[in-house]
Image (spheres, grey):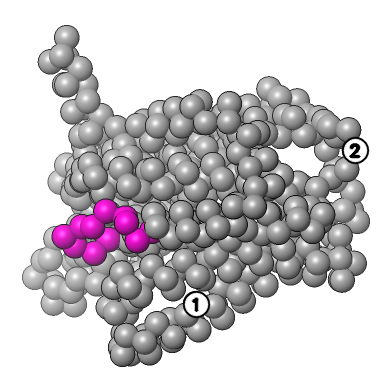
Amino acid sequence: MKATMLKFIMYLQDSELVASFQRKCGLFAIEIEHQCSDETKLVRDIKNPPDDRLTAKQRGNGNLKEQLIGSETHDSNSNYKYETTGHNVDGAYWPRYQVRNMLFYYLFLLSAGLGQEVFYITFLPCIHWNLDPFLCRRLVNMWTVVMYIGQVMKDMLKMSRPLAPPVVKLETRVDAEYGMPSTHAMAATAISFTLLLSAAHRFQFWFEAGLLVAIVLSALVCLSRLYTGMHSALDVICGVLISGMLMLVTYPSWETFDQLQLTSPLSPIVAVVLPLFLSYSYPELDHYSTTRGDTTIILGVGSGCWVGYWVNQQLGETFEPQGEFPLPLPALTAPALARGSARFLVGVALLLSTRQVVRTLSLWMLCTWHQVSADDTQAHRRKEIEVPYKFATYAAVGLVNTTLLNKVFVLLGLS
């Protein structure tokens, strides 16, 4: 029994399983065979037999070498897409992958984006601005807990990501990170189902439809981690299970934590001291990884939002919907959509401005204090610089989102 279980786990961890999924979705690793003639560069898939080779002439677009120059190229006859590396062999570039199904390509890239900073800095605040600050607070709290635990587990377990080849890797920034568990899968699961469970007590909607949406969105994000080649099936499955277990364990205490977070006089102190401590005590690695910086960003956002929601509660300006819960969902009228779009654009602009200003100032102050150049990107990775500047930057973003922006909307007549 143990041997069978171990064999199954190894199967889920196998890089070839990820590569097989990619090929089924139309993503193929390819390479260039450098021939003597510049006019005859042959392209073949690593997994395909030799008779699948296509010459430049057969592609009907002249010299293949010209096709492959640049980061992305498209085949005019087959609608295939090629991605090239910067590796040069006598003028010939070596493509990394070929996309044969553009629908899956864009679907999974978009789904992968649901676990990136651009999504968090737009979707979570948008819930606060256009629906209910209560829901945003719940989401940020759960997202912070789940992501911190997932990031720490990565650097403690130290399990590698899928190997390339055979896997095609579409992301490079986080390739130095370890793989187990998938924090994309954890975050997608936590955000989807925390929103579903919390909204059920605040708004009237068809719960089964919400459940279906939560399942589909979570599944798309999970599958995108296989498609992009960044995680094994085991990483993704464990990420979902860990996130689900954390939600199950913490769910009974959500209401109690809400009350303490909003009313306790110690709340703002804990909101700053605890995340800062967790940022500085993050596990050390023998090489630089983006996990510490990304974790600090998450903790900074959680800290800033925590303080902001406490301040709003003390001032009696929570900006939450009024009435007897659950309330009907806001009507999607043209004026409502226009106001919502305006709040979104103003909000994102102010958050990005806050991020840029505070980041620049904090980096300049820290680099001056430590006597290093503010342009030295290697210096930015030092703990004494990376942790405080990222924490300050994103704590400011969280604070502005929860306190200042609501007042701006009122002044602009967008409330």
Regarding residue 129, the answer to whether it shows in the image is no
Q: Residue at x 30, y 43 (%)?
A: 153
The location of residue 389, given as percent across then percent down, is 44, 73
Q: Which mark is residue 323?
A: 2
Question: Looking at the magenta stretch, what is its main secondary structure?
Answer: loop
Taking 323 as reference, is 52 left or right? left
| Residue interval drawn in magenta | 279-289
Label 1 close to label 2 by CB (< 8 Å): no
Look at the image and say whether residue 286 sits in the magenta stretch: yes
How far separated are the C-alphas under marks 1 and 2? 40 Å
- Judging depth in this view, the residue of 204 and 318 nearest the camera is 318
Position of residue 305 relative to residue 157, above or below, is: below
The quarter in which the N terminus is drawn is top left
The residue under the point 89% across, 48% down is 333
Q: Circle 1 sits in a helix, a strand or a loop, which is it? A: helix
Q: Nearer the viewer, residue 106 or 346?
A: 346
